């Protein structure tokens, strides 16, 4: 790791004052939360900031609270471990707790934070190899496109084919989460889904619309009474790993047998951002959970979820994998 | 990953290691020679540190002053910057992927290779050397001995720290929870079956009101 200055502000305003406005300088000053992604990037010389702004002395940013209206408010410094164990999150926002628990290992979850998880950089091995000057690092070529692309995108790819690595993002998008971004000039709030950008949409070297002078301070998940949700992640290595593919499913149901009235379906590990598939989710509406008709609608949702998929040479397996995960996730909800 | 060249890029592991090593050494030399050491408040209320600074860490219950740079990891402090060195904490991948460097930070398991020492001030750090109470081994240590849960032993301190953190927080942990607790630890000798046996035995010993 190259040497850097370590600045520890004690208020959010002080932290914001440390950040550059200039896009050209965005990688010279980095926010430091749990460091579980950033330090690996620095050790690999993928980013060599001259200053780290340590967020952990700013009090209050690690809170997880249920607002009076039932909204779940998660501070950016809440650890994944705390979120996975948080009782109300487990009960009412189940897929979020499950996704947090699926991240890395106990050691990563005890330090890794929600803000860091949502802002982590891609795991594509060409990006992670300092000798590969790929598109993501300002180069001219996505080596994964014609190279070893087993772990890359089947949906939404081009010109870069990374998949977004965050488990939490997939689950939070399924529950219509909003993020608050603060800068010295003020605050803006947007749907987490809109926070992420495709490589074809904006700056190909970034995954989000976060400005260099902004901090993601909070995530808000609206109350969803009558909803149930689950996060299902398939890993190549059982013990701990990033998702080869994952699904977050949320359904609102009522009656007996329970009939689905509304649904959300978001795919992870298959696209450069959490891949929301509202048309596939709509195929689930109106059918009873656990019925024969329900099984058929899950299959139908699987077909709709991968519309437009363009697998690369080594990742066509992700198409049936994600379809199988959708069926299993809905079965799991029916069994609850 | 396979060692293949794509788009004219040398992706071989050797090429990578050679150049990474060169960069690290160059960085360290330049830094030592030129940077002015500084730490403290500069009027704006923001604590800043650069160059070499003295910090205080609480290691196994003892306060220790140690000189570090902001980039110095806790792992590097334990193994190279305290006297006597705490080399029970192992360095293997240095990238948060193997678990050999697992310590407790405020009772939670953490990879010492992914912690900045300067950020560990004010926290209680326990290493494998601090786990036993005098001559009484932690139940997990005792069970590892009794169940022969190691071969070469290089991964062992990490496994013991991961499992002891779990059992200290959750004395009723199930086998699945114990497996989850050490999922971030890798054993090249493949001792997992004995490790899990030892974990369950330690859990029983703890429940039976054993050592602790
Ligand atoms: C072995 C290993 C396994 C892992 N497995 C998984 C996995 O299975 N699933 C998964 O999702 N992740 C995984 N990760 C990635 C990552 O470590 C975790 O997701 C963790 O949550 C990152 O959080 P952090 O607080 O440590 O982030 P940091 O490393 O501190 O920060 C990450 C990035 O986010 C920026 N950032 C941090 N906080 C903010 C903020 N509030 N506002 C704006 N930007 C911010 C930082 O500047 C940095 O660029 C793994 C990492 C390792 C090393
Ligand atoms: S040396 Fe820290 S996890 Fe491998
Ligand atoms: S006992 Fe040899 S690595 Fe685990």
Image (spheres, rainbow, N blue to C red):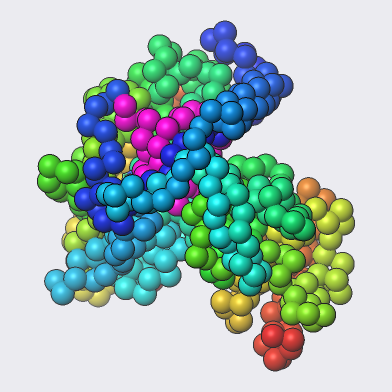
Percent x, y of residue B39: 45, 47
Q: Is residue B144 above or below residue B207?
A: above
Foreground of the two, A245 or B123: B123
> x, y percentage for residue B47?
38, 51
**Residue occupying the point 54% across, 55% down:** B55
Residue shown at the point (42%, 14%) measured from the top left? A139
Residue A186 to residue A137: above or below:
below
Seen from the viewer's position, the closer of residues B210 and A161 is: B210
Q: Nearer the viewer, residue A267 or A160?
A: A160
Location of the C terminus of chain A by quadrant is bottom left
> Could you say where residue B62 lies in the image, as x and y percent from the top left?
64, 70
Across and down, in percent, residue B44 comes to 27, 49
Which residue reaches farthest top? B8
**Residue A49 lies within the magenta run:** yes
Quadrant in the rendering for residue B109: bottom right
Is residue A63 in the magenta section?
no
Q: Quadrant of the N terminus of chain A?
A: top right
Q: Magenta residues, as a range?
A: A25-54
């Amino acid at each position: 790791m190259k040497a850097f200055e370590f600045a520890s502000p004690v208020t959010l305003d002080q932290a914001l004052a440390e950040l550059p406005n200039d896009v050209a300088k965005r990688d010279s000053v980095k926010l430091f939360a749990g460091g579980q992604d950033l330090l690996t990037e620095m050790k690999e010389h993928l980013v060599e900031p001259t200053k780290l702004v340590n967020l952990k002395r700013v009090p209050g940013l690690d809170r997880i609270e249920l607002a009076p209206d039932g909204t779940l408010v998660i501070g950016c410094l809440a650890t994944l471990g705390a979120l996975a164990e948080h009782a109300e999150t487990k009960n009412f926002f189940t897929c979020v707790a499950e996704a947090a628990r699926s991240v890395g290992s106990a050691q990563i979850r005890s330090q890794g934070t929600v803000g860091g998880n949502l802002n982590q950089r891609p795991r594509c091995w060409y990006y992670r190899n300092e000798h590969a000057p790929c598109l993501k690092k300002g180069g001219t070529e996505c080596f994964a496109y014609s190279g070893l692309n087993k772990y890359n995108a089947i949906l939404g790819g081009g010109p870069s084919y990374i998949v977004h690595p965050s488990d939490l993002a997939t689950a939070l998008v399924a529950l219509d989460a909003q993020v608050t971004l603060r800068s010295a000039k003020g605050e803006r709030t947007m749907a987490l889904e809109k926070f992420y950008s495709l490589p074809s949409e904006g700056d190909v070297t970034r995954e989000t619309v976060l400005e260099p002078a902004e901090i993601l301070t909070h995530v808000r998940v609206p109350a969803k009474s009558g909803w149930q949700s689950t996060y299902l992640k398939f890993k190549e290595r059982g013990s701990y790993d990033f998702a080869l593919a994952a699904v977050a499913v949320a359904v609102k149901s009522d009656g007996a047998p329970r009939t689905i009235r509304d649904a959300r379906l978001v795919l992870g590990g298959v696209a450069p951002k959490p891949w929301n598939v509202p048309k596939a989710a709509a195929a689930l509406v109106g059918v009873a959970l656990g019925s024969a008709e329900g099984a058929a609608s899950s299959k139908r949702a699987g077909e709709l979820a991968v519309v437009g998929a363009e697998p690369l040479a080594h990742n066509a397996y992700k198409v049936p994998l994600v379809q199988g995960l959708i069926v299993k996730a809905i079965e799991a909800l029916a069994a609850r | 990953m396979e060692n293949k060249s794509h788009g004219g890029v040398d992706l071989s592991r050797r090429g990578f290691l050679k150049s990474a090593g060169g960069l690290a050494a160059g960085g360290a030399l330049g830094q030592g020679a030129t940077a002015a050491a500084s730490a403290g408040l500069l009027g704006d209320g923001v604590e800043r540190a650069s160059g070499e600074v003295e910090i205080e860490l609480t290691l196994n219950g003892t306060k220790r002053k140690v000189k570090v740079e902001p980039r110095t990891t806790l792992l590097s402090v334990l193994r190279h910057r305290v006297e006597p060195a705490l080399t029970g904490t192992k360095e293997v991948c240095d990238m948060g992927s193997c678990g050999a460097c697992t310590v407790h930070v405020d009772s939670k398991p953490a990879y010492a290779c992914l912690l900045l020492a300067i950020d560990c001030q004010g926290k209680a750090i326990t290493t494998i050397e601090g786990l036993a109470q005098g001559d009484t081994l932690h139940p997990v240590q005792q069970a590892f001995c009794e169940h022969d849960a190691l071969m070469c032993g290089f991964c062992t301190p990490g496994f013991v720290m991961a499992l002891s953190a779990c059992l200290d927080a959750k004395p009723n942990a199930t086998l699945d929870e114990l497996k989850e607790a050490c999922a971030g630890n890798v054993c090249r000798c493949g001792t997992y079956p004995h490790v899990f046996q030892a974990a369950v035995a330690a859990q029983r010993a703890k429940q039976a009101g054993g050592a602790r």
